[in-house]
Image (cartoon, rainbow, N blue to C red):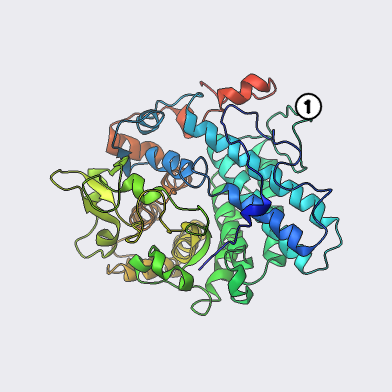
Amino acid sequence: MKKIYIILAMLMVISTSSCKKFLEEDPYDFISEDKFYKTEGDALAALNGVVSIMQLQQYYGRTIWIVNDLTGDQMKVGAPQTNRPELYSQTYTSTNGEISNWWTNSYVLINRANDVIKNVEGGSIPAPSRDNIVGNAKFLRALAYFDLIRSFGDVPLITKPTAATDDLKPARTPIKAVYAQVIEDLIFAEVNCTKEDKIPAASKGRVSSGAASALLAKVYLTRASSTAAEPTDYQNALMECNKVIAVSPAVYTLLPFADVFDPNKKAANKEEIFAVQFGLPPNTGNITPRMHLPKAVAPFDGNEAFYVENSFALSYAATDTRKAATIGVVPATTNFYYLKFTDPSRQGNSARNNWVILRYADVLLMQSEAMNQINTGDVNKFNGINAVRARAGLLPLSFVNTPGKEDFITALVNERGWEFAAEGQRRYDLLRLGRMKDQQLKVHNIVLEDKYLLMPIPETERTTNGNLTQNPDF
């Protein structure tokens, strides 16, 4: 459904090396402000330059889900590789290449978004087109910062475009201030981005107001469990969830589970709220299926980079229809693999599967999570989670089988695991729900050190910026 038409001809090649200082693009690598931003088309081309960063393998195309799922409790390393075993064993350091890639490309995206915001806000493009474009850029900037603070804690907050000629050595900004900026950006996007059902077919994939509401819900829900928590966070999370649910089923709805990931059905995917687009010309294939698929399964050219944790594969109920759409068995072995992203018509790195960041099932489960925190005795908290369970063929939960607040959190941990397996959410979920240490001990027999609740600041960044302090004990 969500097709971003990236105008690659208007983009210049960028370097994504993890050794390059963040924000060190030549001014301006992708679109020069003195040559563009004259028309709405120019601004959209610049916005496409922001979106294109998300497709990189060193960002949402691979790195983020690898880090989040390997440091969770559902995925393990398959074929021999560098950087990744230490993520799985919770022994990663500040020199880990995947972590460095994440940081670097986050700030490339942020810098590009800042450039769009600065030039379009002050330009001559008429509203509401101007505000819609700025809203898209602010949503993408907010998403990048939200990912950063969930992973690294305090990070430099930069809201103006920078260039290679700048002597920029920012210090880390407390997460309270970064959260405030993220929320401000998303509120702007919610008000000014086009509603999902009003986005023209040729522009599907742009940020919608519904996507901003869904991400705001997750931001409030996450901040509520952090050191930056505000008293109204859970209420605000519930309010944002309810905004999205209010337009169901006309705008968003639950689909048959396998259809959510079927690249042949993505044009009509009403469960997908926001996703990174793949499968568009000339070369925007998704490598994810190849990394999960086993070598022995023709004709998909899998490289068996990852397996499913056996304990997780065996945790599904016999009647849970999600298992058959999520997990397969590697031929002639006892290993399981993730098959939910398979593209039957493509091999290698050319899969057409979108990478889904927000979908309707997530909103339903967030609604239940917020309600459990606000009033654990509210029977309506079962509505969202039971809708997701019903789609999977499972019996409903109630106060009879899930009586207390912690029982409900355990149910959410399990349900989110079965629902979002291998979607890059597991680390975030375990941290937010307070079960990271418990699951590492239960699944991996690891007594997790506190320092691994955060990622280290990449050493390459600290080498070039002496103002960047390191997280404790790294």
Mark 1: give few (<14), some (14-19) or many (20+) Cα within 10 Å: few
* The quadrant where residue 237 appears: bottom right
> What residue is rendered at 68% in x and 66% in y?
193
Q: Is residue 294 left or right of residue 228?
A: left
Number of numbered discs present? 1
* The quadrant where residue 38 appears: bottom right
Q: Is residue 33 above or below residue 98?
A: below
Q: Is residue 327 left or right of residue 20?
A: left
Q: Is residue 74 above or below residue 5?
A: above
The residue beneath circle 1 is 167
Q: Is residue 348 left or right of residue 184?
A: left
Comparing 321 with 6, the one in front is 6
Query: Residue 241's spot in the image, x, y percent?
Result: 55, 65
Comparing 114 with 172, the one in front is 114
Q: Is residue 355 left or right of residue 227?
A: left
> What residue is rendered at 74% in x and 32% in y?
164
Comparing 6 with 310, the one in front is 6
* The quadrant where residue 411 appears: bottom left
Comparing 29 with 153, the one in front is 29
Can see residue 196?
A: no
Query: Residue 23's spot in the image, x, y percent?
Result: 69, 35
> What residue is rendered at 63% in x and 57% in y?
7
Task: Name the outermost residue toward the left.
Answer: 332
Query: Residue 381's spot in the image, x, y percent?
Result: 44, 66
**Residue type pointed to by label 1:** Asp
> What residue is rendered at 50% in x and 23% in y?
95
Q: Secondary structure at mark 1?
A: loop
Query: Residue 439's spot in the image, x, y percent?
Result: 34, 40
